[in-house]
Structures are given as structure tokens and as C-alpha cells.
Amino acid sequence: MGEWSSFISIVRNLSLLYVTHKYVGTAAITYGPSMLPTLNITGNVLLVERISIRTGKLRPGDVVILRSPQTPRKIICKRLIGMEGDQVTYVVDPKNSDRCKTIVVPKGHVWVEGDYIYDSKDSRNFGAVPYGLLEGRAFWTLLPRKDFGSLAPKPKS
Amino acid sequence: MRQWMNIAKEAIARASIVVKFICLLHVTDAYLLSSSHVLGPSMLPTLNTTGDVVLVENLSHRIGKLGSGDLVLVRSPLDPKKSITKRIIAMEGDKVTFSARNHSFLSLVVPKGHVWIQGDNLYVSRDSREFGPIPYGLIQGKVFFRVSYAILIAFEFVPNIDFHCLYLFCNVGNI
């Protein structure tokens, strides 16, 4: 009976932790070059909160994590550029040309781009992303120590 | 003062048990089995217009065991606060041929990471023929069971047993 009750209490504590992770906030480890200079290639640990997504209080300029529309098991980290109805101008292929395109973000979708557009697979590749794929908003960097603090706003090009 | 501290401690201890139990229920609901009330004409004759209570299991889409022909609950790409129920017609890589609004036939290959969904009642269904293939990540669960109206009649929730309800009496079990 003793083992059963301790097992139940462990399961309950884990469930509480899970619900916090799913509905309040969590930590995320990011790596890759697509968000330079805001985030490192080798990796950052970010604090992510999920409340803004549910209340709809996101604004362009927020760093968000979302489920990749091409690989559903992967979570990617990009910056929110446009909400539904916004007009977005983007450079289609910055490595080869300066050609720009302007589109209006369709209803129920958002436009995300990495800060380092030369090496980022984002909405310029896979189009506007449905809002339902957004997972959280990153608002604080925990590691590495020298980057501890809130995330920088979009760098001006 | 000390009395209030003790009362507060006991209240927090009891509240935390309740909170943890609710979290356990929620985890079961999110990862194993949940129920949903679906309504609307886009899935006739499989599901009713006036509303059905269905059981949704949330395990298959996480382990990749969904295929064409499955009824799924997905988050709407047009309105992220709404969930819609449709049938998966094609998975990624499959070729889909459908007739657009102007009665011409269009063909496309479902891109990677996406699925093509359609309602069973093609005339009034807003589905992938309108908003294109949807990312797999929007799928919330697989509908596998409809709760029979026979149970509701048994508990006298339905006041008027007319012929319509007697017909629904037979609609129990797997979809």
C-alpha cells in the first residue's frame, strides 16, 4: 500500500509539471544559424511562455517557437514578422538577388522569418504558417551566461 | 496569527492534492482519450448535423499511425480557436484529384509534412479543397467511436422518442 501511494504521488507531481509545461511555460534548447545574431549557432537555453499564444497577445517582433509545417516532429524558433491581415515585404533569395515580394498574410496564419535570412528556412520557403502551429513565445535567455537577459528586438538591416 | 498560518497551510495542502489530481486527469485526456461534441452538416451521413458526442484518442497521431480514411479532429487553419472534424483523404506524397468550385478537375501532390482532409458531405464542407493541405502538426486526435443515443434514451435525456431517435438507436459502435 505504501509503494502504491508513493507511486500515485509521483505520477501526480509529474502531471502537475506537465500541465505547467503545456499551459504556463517551459524551457527550450535552440541551435542553428537561422536566428543569428540574436541566438547562437551552438545553442541557447530560452524561457518560453505559452500564455500569450492562448490569449492572442502576440505582436510582430516576438521570438516564437512553432511546430515545423514540413517536419511535424520538429520545433523551430523564428521571429514573428506579420500577423493575419498584415502586409509583409520580404527578400525572396538574399544570397542571389535583391528581389522583394509583398504579400498579405491570410486569415488564421502568421508570417515568421529567421533573423539571419541568408541561412534560414522560414515563411519565405514554406509560406504563411497556420496560427495553430505556434507553441510558445521565447522571452528570456538563460544560457550561455553572457547572454542572460531578455531577447534582443529585431536587428535593423 | 499562528492560527491563520496553520489554516492557510492546511488549505494549501488540500488544494494541492486536488490540483494534482486534476492535472492527472488532464494528462490522460490529452494523451489517451478524450470526448468531444461535434456538430455541423459537413460530415453527413457519418455524423449528424445536430451534434454527436464522439470519443477521440490522442495517441495515434503522436506515433504516426494515422492514415487515409481516418476521421480526425484538427485545429482549423482559418480560425485557430475552432476545432473541425474531417476525414483524411491523402497523406504526404500522395496525389490528390478533386473538383474545384467551377467544376474543373485539379490534381496535386500533398507536400511533405501535410495531409489532405475532406468532409464526407462534399457539397457543404469547407476543407482542403478550399484552404489547401494542412500541416500534420494541426491534427489533435483521431475520432474512433460515437457515443450511442441509446445510452441517452436509457437515461431519459431525450424526452420525445420519435422514429428519428429509434433509427439512431442502431447507430452505435465503430465509425
Image: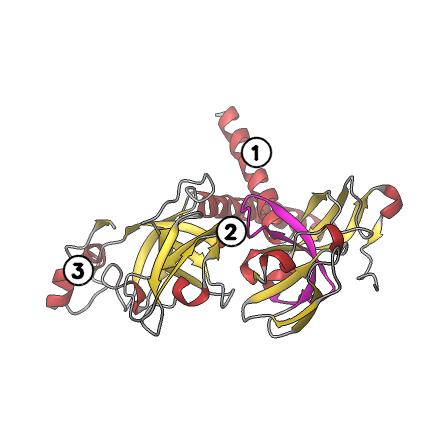
In the image, A5: left or right of B96?
right
Q: Which mark is residue B169?
A: none
Residue B154, quarter of picture = bottom left
Q: Identify the secondary structure beneath mark 3.
A: helix
* Circle 2 chain: B
Q: Is residue A130 above or below residue B71?
A: below
Q: Position of residue A46 (x, y in %)?
A: 74, 47
Q: Position of residue B68 (x, y in %)?
A: 34, 48
- Name the residue carrying label 3: B168
Query: Residue pushed farthest front?
Result: A96
Q: In the rendered structure, which disc, 3 or 2, sits on the residue that comes first in sequence? A: 2
| Secondary structure type for disc 2 | helix
Residue under pointer 2: B137
Q: Which mark is residue A10?
A: 1
- Which stretch did the figure color magenta? A55-82
**How far across and down, in percent of the image, does residue B42 sit?**
31, 66
Residue A63 lies in magenta, yes or no? yes
Question: Residue B143 in magenta?
Answer: no
Q: Is residue A66 above or below residue A15?
A: below
The location of residue A17, given as percent across then percent down, is 61, 43
Chain designation of label 3: B
